[in-house]
Image (spheres, helix red, strand yellow):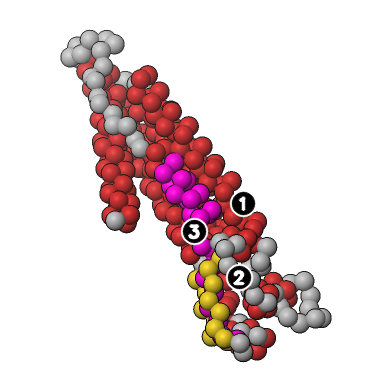
Amino acid sequence: MAHIEDEATDEEFFTDVRRNRKAIKEDILDETFKKAEISKGLRPQGVKKAIKKPFLKLGIVLIIIAIISLVAINYAPWLYLKYDTDYGTIQELYDRDFKNGDYYPEIDNIFESPCTNCSNNSKNFMGLTKNDFSTIPKTATSGFYILALIGIIFTITEIIRKIRDFSGGLTSIIHSSFAAAAAVVGIFLATLLIKFLGFLFMLYYNRSFIEAASADNIVAVCFAPIALMLISFATIIISITVVKINFSEYEKKLELEKQYSDYSSYKYGGG
């Protein structure tokens, strides 16, 4: 059910983006050819065609993403571990900071090398340490708070835009700026969380070394980190899509203005 609701939200968001793109295009066309109509006496000076611009919900989408992510950070399991030992099979779910689960000594050997004469780098042979389950959630929390703040400011700006009726060019700049900021935050979060994906690959690569230390048939799944990483990638894709749409409209505006300039030069002998 949640997956269906997420798809509906995404579809509604991109529908708003398409509607806004159409409105911006109409605004650009109106701005570009208004001068020609005024010069030919077809439109009184100062009269502008009213164009209804939809309320772009990028800010609301970012706020929803941030809320879901913050709930996942604090309440979703960060690690599922299952392995065999001499005294039986161990199976545990751990939250951040290894809470809500019994802690076993084999975990130390999974995340840190058991050798006694190792360098500092050897102790991080999995690319992830136990300490990361404390520090990364805290940093990710700050990142998603920033994402929520971007969404709130964007939404307020959209309300002001609807009231003040900003031009298409200014609207594109505002949308692109906030979308670019959200993309940067998304890239930072994805880079931060990708360590957990690397840990799963390293666990497979070093399986024989770990099993020789203490644990056999290890199975590990990082639920919250992988989900948050996917959410971060989705944020990047949505934000870049908005930037690309606005950049495309800006290029079209320049092209239309050039066409108008060429038309004016030919029609009235300018330049």
> Would you say the residues marked 2 and 1 are in contact, meaning their CB atoms lie under 8 Å apart?
no
Q: Residues within 10 Å of mark 2 (few under 14, many from 20)?
A: few
Magenta-drawn segment: 63-85
Identified at 65% across, 79% down, the residue is 106
Q: Quadrant of residue 146?
A: top right
State which quadrant residue 157 falls in. top left
Q: Residues within 10 Å of mark 3 (few under 14, many from 20)?
A: some
Does the magenta-highlighted stretch encompass residue 75?
A: yes
Dot 3 and dot 1 residues touching (CB under 8 Å): no
**Residue positioned 61% across, 51% down in the render:** 139
Query: Residue flagged by tag 2: what amino acid is it?
Result: Asp
Mark 2 lies on a secondary structure that is loop
Q: Amino acid at mark 3?
A: Ala
In the figure, is residue 238 to the left or right of 117? left
Can residue 200 be seen in the rendering of this structure?
no
Quadrant of the image for the N terminus?
Answer: bottom left
Give how far across and how far down residue 123 sits, in percent: 73, 74
Read off the residue under disc 2.
Answer: 102
Drawn side of residue 203 relative to residue 68, left or right: right
Mark sitting earlier along the chain (3/1): 3
| Numbered-mark total | 3
